[in-house]
Image (spheres, grey):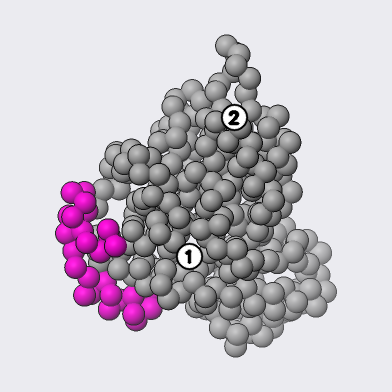
Amino acid sequence: MIDLRSDTVTKPTQAMRLAGFDAEVGDDVFEEDPTVRQLEERAAEMFGKEAALYVTSGTQGNQAAVLTHCNPGEEIIMEANAHLFLYEGATMSALAGVQPRTIQGERGAMSPDDVEAAIRKDDIHFPETSLICLENTHNKAGGAILPWDNMKAIHEIGQRYNIPVHLDGARIFNASVATGISVKEYASLTDTVQFCLSKGLGAPVGSILVGPKSFIKRARKWRKRLGGGMRQAGVIAAPGLVALNEMVDRLEEDHEHAKNLAESVNSISGLEVEGKVETNIVLINVKETGMDAEAFLAKLKEQGVLAVPFGPYTIRMVTNKEVSAEDLPEVKKQLEKCVQA
C-alpha cells in the first residue's frame, strides 16, 4: 500500500529507535526525566520561548493551552475551519467551558479587520474574548501557509487589546521550510505555540507546547489533569530530539513530492487539484468522475493507494517520508484507473 492518508503514518527512523533504547530516564511528573528536560529545553530554544512542555498529542497541547489561557464562560476567536474547531471533539467547550467564535478566512487566514471586529465589547450580555487562535500550516485549507503580514497584524491586535495569541503549529516546520522564515520568527508573533513531533518529523509520539515560564508551569498542571503526566518518558522523548535535530530539512522533499503529485493529478481528465499546493497536502476534487469521495477512495484502496475524504467530493493526500519519488508514478497510474472505472 502507498499510504497518503496523513504524515502521521510515518515510522520512526533507526536513529530514533536507538535513541529511545539508550535514553536516560526518570519520573517526568517529578520533572526528573533528563531526556524529556533536554527535549523541552531544545524546543524552547528553537522557538525563542522561555519554557516548553512535552505532551502526548497535538490535541492535548492545544487544549492545555486553551485551559491555561482561558476561564469558563469566555470566548476564543478562530478560523471557521480550524483544527481546534473541527477535529478536537469540542474539548474547549466540554472541558474548558469556553465557546469558539469562528471567522471565515481565505485559505485559512482570517482578515485582521474581522478579528478586531469579533473582539467582544465590555457588555453584560457578552462573553469576554480571552484568546485568538491561528493555525499554520492550515490543514483544512490544504496545507496553506499563513502569510507573515497576516500573522503580524493579528498579533498586534492581540497586543492592543491585551488578548494572547496561540498558534496551532502542528505543521509549523513545513511552513518554515517552505518560506525560509524560522520557527523562532513565527513564534515571535504569538504568545504560545503547539507543534507536532509525530507528523512530517517522523517521531513516534508527542507534541510540544512552548511559551512563558509562568504559562508552562500552569499548563503542566493541566497536562496532569488531562491524564498526560508521564513517568519514564525519555524513551519516547529521545526520538523527538532526533526529529528536531535531524528531520526538519527533509520536509522539503515532501513538498516537492506534493507539487509533483499535484501536476500529475491536473493532467488526469476528471480530477482537479483544489487550491495551491504550498507544502505537503494535496486536495483533489473528484466530482467530474461521477463518484463521491467515499466511492472514489474505496476504488483507490483496491488499487493499493490510501487517502482520506475531505469533503463530499474532495479527497486529501499527504506526502510523507514513507512515500518515495518512485511511488508517485504508481499513484498517478492508479488514479487514472479509478477515473476510467
Residue 83, position as x, y percentages in the image: 56, 48
Query: Magenta stretch?
Result: 10-38
In reply to whether residue 26 is colored magenta, the answer given is: yes
Q: Is residue 121 above or below residue 329?
A: above
The residue at 27%/60% (across/down) is: 36
Residue 142, position as x, y percentages in the image: 66, 59
Q: Is residue 224 above or below residue 21?
A: above
Residue position marked by numbered label 2 in the rendering: 161
Q: CA distance from mark 1 to mark 2?
A: 34 Å
Describe residue 306's horizontal placement relative to residue 11 as left or right.
right
Question: Could you say whether the residue bearing mark 2 is in a helix, strand or loop?
Answer: helix
Residue 295, position as x, y percentages in the image: 66, 63
The residue at 33%/75% (across/down) is: 16
Describe residue 196's horizontal placement relative to residue 314 as left or right.
left
Q: Is residue 228 above or below residue 299?
A: above
Question: Could you say whether the residue bearing mark 1 is in a helix, strand or loop?
Answer: loop
The residue at 69%/83% (across/down) is: 333
Residue position marked by numbered label 1 in the rendering: 199
Question: Which one is in front, 190 or 196?
Answer: 190
Question: Which one is in front, 340 or 21?
Answer: 21
Is residue 55 something that shows in the picture? Answer: no
* The image quarter in which residue 335 lies: bottom right
Give, as a three-letter code, the residue at label 1: Lys
Residue 140, position as x, y percentages in the image: 63, 53
Q: Residue furthest bottom?
A: 326
